Image (cartoon, rainbow, N blue to C red):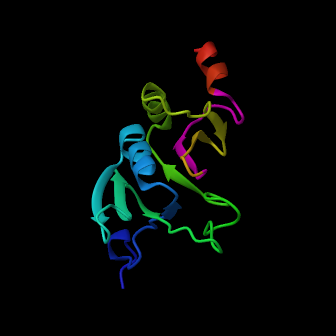
Amino acid sequence: MENSKDNYNIQYAVPLFMVSNMETSLKFYTDGLGFTTLNTWTPRGKIEWCWLQREGGPLMLQEFRVSETKPYLSGDKPGAGVSIWFQCLDSLALYHEFIDKGIDAQEPFVGNGLWDVRVIDPDGYYLHFESPTDVPEETKYSEWVDKK
């Protein structure tokens, strides 16, 4: 068997985030972060699951059903212990795009040779958008811009 990415059986991972309010989450991911809705599941007349994609970064959202004995599916609140890193060509361009759209993106910094742009979705999930750089480790974006 050839050892080419085109021949790998498992091509990439798609995270599934359980969300507390699908409408709020869809607005955040589509209007704020620029994802497109590719597929939906509407068993009760409203979207309860969807597949979103932005360029090569897919993810799925599902609205969880709250019960008295199970208020959340992970930890004691949505988003507990979950984060994802999107590998990008230019995470700083995304930072500016997100800020322009009113998303509260944290100031980028360099870690492990990557610009890291972090946002937190409405349910507390940490999303990191990273791109390679030769800027020194732990440099903050504001420090780097001031030196340019």
Report the residue at 60% width, 69% height from top: 73
Residues 135 and 33: in front is 33
Left or right: 101 with respect to 143?
left
Looking at the picture, does residue 97 appear above or below residue 65?
A: above
Left or right: 76 with respect to 90?
right
- Residue 55 position within the rendered picture, expressed as x and y whole percent measured from the top left: 34, 50
Looking at the picture, does residue 72 appear above or below residue 117?
A: below
Residues 145 and 1: in front is 145
Task: Name which quarter of the figure residue 44 lies in.
Answer: bottom left
Report the residue at 61% width, 57% height from top: 79
Q: Is residue 126 magenta?
A: yes
Classify the position of the N terminus by image quarter: bottom left
Left or right: 62 with respect to 109?
left
Task: Name which quarter of the figure residue 137 lies in.
Answer: top right
Q: What stretch is highlighted in magenta?
A: 124-140
Looking at the picture, does residue 21 appear above or below residue 45?
A: above
